[in-house]
């Protein structure tokens, strides 16, 4: 179990948000419903979806590295 208040937990939470928003960007109804706002609090999800689609190789590598870190080191 990862503590949400540790640095590891924050990285995992950020990766989870980025991956989820990038997936929602691929589904037209979810994109229209969740990712229509570009400013304000809901704009964070829009920006996370942009990061997930443009830097998909970096995000995927970070997810694999964090998975190995949690399984074998922590």
Image (spheres, grey):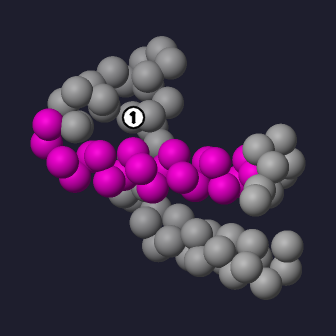
Mark 1 closeness class: few <14, some 14–19, many ≥20 residues within 10 Å: many
Q: Position of residue 48 (x, y in %)?
A: 47, 43
Q: Is residue 30 magenta?
A: no
Q: Residue at x 36, y 51 (%)?
A: 22
> Is residue 29 something one can see in this rendering?
yes
Q: Position of residue 53 (x, y in %)?
A: 36, 57
Q: Residue at x 22, y 37 (%)?
A: 30
| Quarter that holds the N terminus | bottom right
Q: Position of residue 49 (x, y in %)?
A: 39, 45
Q: Residue at x 31, y 31 (%)?
A: 35
19 versus 4 height, above or below: below
| Quarter that holds the C terminus | bottom right
Q: Position of residue 9 (x, y in %)?
A: 75, 51
- Based on the displayed image, in which of its 4 quarters is residue 36 positioned? top left
Q: Residue at x 14, y 37 (%)?
A: 29
User: Is 33 situated left or right of 68 in this image?
Assistant: left
User: Is 36 situated left or right of 63 in this image?
Assistant: left
Determine the main secondary structure of the stretch shown in magenta: helix
Q: Secondary structure at mark 1?
A: helix
Q: Which residues are magenta?
A: 9-29
Residue tagged 1: 46
């Amino acid at each position: 179990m990862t503590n949400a208040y540790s640095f590891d937990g924050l990285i995992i939470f950020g990766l989870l948000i980025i991956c989820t928003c990038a997936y929602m960007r691929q589904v037209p109804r979810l994109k229209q419903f969740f990712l229509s706002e570009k400013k304000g609090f809901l704009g964070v999800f829009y920006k996370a979806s942009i990061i997930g689609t443009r830097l998909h190789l970096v995000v995927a590598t970070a997810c694999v590295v964090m998975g190995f870190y949690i399984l074998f080191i922590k």
